[in-house]
Image: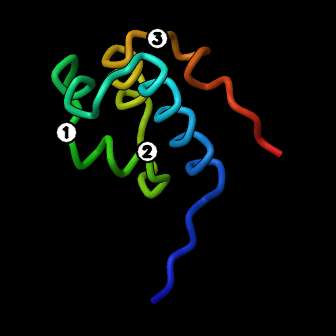
């Protein structure tokens, strides 16, 4: 069965990766700062994981950014 990724999740994942790379951090750097697993962060960055509010907050904490900064990406 072919699954299509929601383009909003893909754009958000690209934003997460962009923020992480701007800080010069590896995936390991991010997961050691919070309660995210490597597989969850990989899935978020690839746009294949739809997640909840608490995961968003944990992601913000781990990346040391506000939710508004992380959610600042264009949707067309």
Query: Gap between marks 2 and 1, in whole Å?
Result: 12 Å
From the top left corner, tell me how far across and down residue 56 is, in percent.
43, 28
Residue 49 in picture, x, y percent from top left: 41, 53
Residue at the front extreme of this rendering: 24
User: Are the residues at dot 2 and dot 1 in contact (C-beta closer than 8 Å)?
Assistant: no
Q: Residues within 10 Å of mark 1 (few under 14, many from 20)?
A: some
Residue bearing mark 2: 45
Mark 3: give few (<14), some (14-19) or many (20+) Cα within 10 Å.
Answer: few
Real-space Cα separation, disc 1 to disc 3, in angstroms:
18 Å
The numbered mark, 1 or 3, whose residue comes first in the sequence reads: 1
Contact between marks 1 and 3 (CB within 8 A): the answer is: no
Residue 14: percent from left, percent from top: 55, 41
Say which residue appears at 83% left-offset and 46% top-offset: 76
Residue identifier under label 1: 37
Which is more toward the observer, 3 or 20? 20
Q: Label 2 neighbourhood size at 10 Å, few (<14), some (14-19), many (20+)?
A: many
Disc 2 versus disc 3: distance between alpha carbons? 16 Å
Q: State the SS at label 2.
A: helix
Residue under label 3, please give it. Answer: 65
């Amino acid at each position: 069965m072919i699954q299509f990724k929601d383009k909003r999740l893909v754009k958000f994942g690209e934003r997460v990766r962009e923020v992480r790379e701007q800080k010069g951090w590896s995936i390991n750097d991010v997961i050691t700062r919070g309660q995210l697993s490597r597989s969850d962060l990989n899935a978020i960055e690839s746009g294949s994981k739809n997640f909840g509010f608490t995961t968003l907050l944990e992601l913000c904490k781990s990346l040391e950014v506000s939710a508004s900064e992380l959610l600042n990406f264009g949707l067309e």
